[in-house]
Image (cartoon, grey):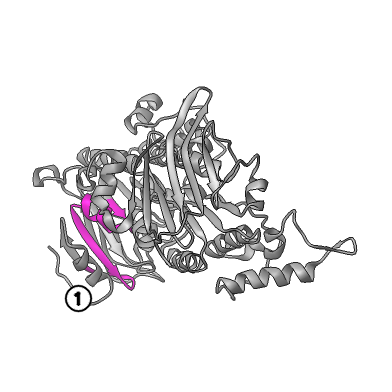
Amino acid sequence: MGLTDEAPTVRMLGIGKQFLGNPVLRDVDLELRAGEVHALVGENGAGKSTLMKILAGVHKADAGTVELAGHAVSFASPRQAQAAGISIVHQEFNLLGDRSVAENVYLGREPVRRGHVDRKRMESATADLLDGLGERGISPRTAVRRLPVAQRQVVEIVKALSTDARVLAMDEPTAALADHEVELLYGLVNRLRERGIAILYVSHRLREVFDLSQRITVLKDGELVTSLPTRELTADQLVRHMVGRPLDALFPELATESERGAVRLTVREGGNARLSGIDLDVRAGEIVGLAGLQGAGRSAVARAIAGVDPFTTGSVEIDGERRVIGSPRAAIRRGIAFVTEDRKGEGLALRQSVRDNTLLVRRASFGRARGLGALDLTGLLRSVTLVSRGPDQEVRYLSGGNQQKVVLAKWLAVEPKVLVVDEPTRGIDVGAKKAVYDLLRGLARGGVAILMISSELPELIGMSDRVLVMHEGRIAGELPAGPAEETVMSLATGHSTAEAA
């Protein structure tokens, strides 16, 4: 099924919303059709989440109307919206880990028989829902905490479908998923579409938007910019609609030869349980990209250099001196900083303040011993263009882009020589990506050697002065700046080899 001339399942007309007198949506129109994935995109603050929440009954519009199957509706709560067939799958999972899949799916709506919860009926109904999505590998009796992240996402979707949803709003559904898990979600979304469900899909990942959607609506500053069939847009056009500049303009200029200094990081014949024969050099002033398919060993290289899962063979040199990097603390003391791909799980203490997060590594690794001197916290946070209410704000209340800036500030506080960044822009909007790109290039120009991992090839190519490509735990080749995506993928899949540029 795809785009049709049938009447839309949902029509939102002239939607307006204010919070404390500040308009966040102004005269926005949106249509959702059965069997269609409709992507809603825009920078943080564009109004995407507010529009989604009005549809799902979380907020009530101040202006405009919502029609469902041609009839005007007004929902006072999410429960009313669910009863009408509209459900939302939030970015943050809302599941109870110690309860079973079936108990989570029917939480608060458990079937009852003779005054007791009818577990057999509940588990059977959950099994039918899972089977209908082709998810036979999940048992309704399994505790949710035992499931991998991708299957927890499936449970969230099944929970929404258990209310007989015909409209499903999905907010950044792949934000917590690894690359190989994203492919599983693709299949699930397409099966939902084939069943005739109308899907509103919010994502910052442009590749997902183009892979999955049939129509794209762009919001900017609370207003509708455009709504077009996906086939009529290119990535450059979409980014220009979102931020007012083309995709290429997001990336700062690459390093010139005069801006590149001596080699700061050297790995020779590095190996461990997942890696073998790793040879690489990163010079001061340059950004070296590390490409490869999921499981090829990109993150394993990052974790080995950072001492999380150290190399057990080979050698590591910093500024020409051989160093033993057997732990994260040893790496930090040798001037290596590591921005993990899991910002919330490993990079931040979400319930602590901006100040405490920024000083976390500095305090833990050096204390008073190293004598780094007094830290200009205000200046540091200004340098990463952090937008917050101040250093005492808890980081859980910041946007994804600003959370990532706190992670970067945390590592800048220890004055690193080498910065290893794994998926530095995952889950943040295009405008925030631009700020991170500028920050990384500024650090390189200040003499930091940067090794950057990204699953988004346009990003990796646009930011890298050289690209190393991994395949099955080894470096398959090195490419100069600006390689074609096809060349990178050919190396990543083992179809060709390349000599050092």
Residue 455 percent location from the top left of the image: 33, 59
Q: Give the side of residue 115 with respect to residue 233, left or right.
A: right
Q: Residue furthest top?
A: 21
Report how many numbered discs are placed on residues in the image.
1
- Asked whether 495 or 230 is in front, the reply is 230
Q: Crowding at label 1, few (<14), some or many (≥20) Cα neighbours within 10 Å?
A: few
> Can you say whether 18 is above or below 188 in the image?
above
> Can you say whether 286 is above or below 375 in the image?
below
Quadrant that contains the C terminus: bottom left
Quadrant that contains the N terminus: bottom left
| Residue type at the position of mark 1 | Ser
Residue 341 percent location from the top left of the image: 41, 53
- Asked whether 74 or 25 is in front, the reply is 74
Q: Residue at x 34, y 62 (%)?
A: 298
Which region shows up in magenta? 451-477
Evaluate whether residue 10 shows in this view: yes
On the image, which quarter does residue 43 sit in?
top left
Residue 318 percent location from the top left of the image: 27, 51
Q: Residue at x 16, y 43 (%)?
A: 253
Mark 1, secondary structure of its residue: loop
Label 1: which residue? 496
**Is residue 53 on the magenta stretch?**
no
Q: Residue at x 20, y 39 (%)?
A: 445
**Is residue 476 on the magenta stretch?**
yes
Residue 148 percent location from the top left of the image: 56, 64
Q: Residue furthest right?
A: 114
Evaluate whether residue 340 shows in this view: no
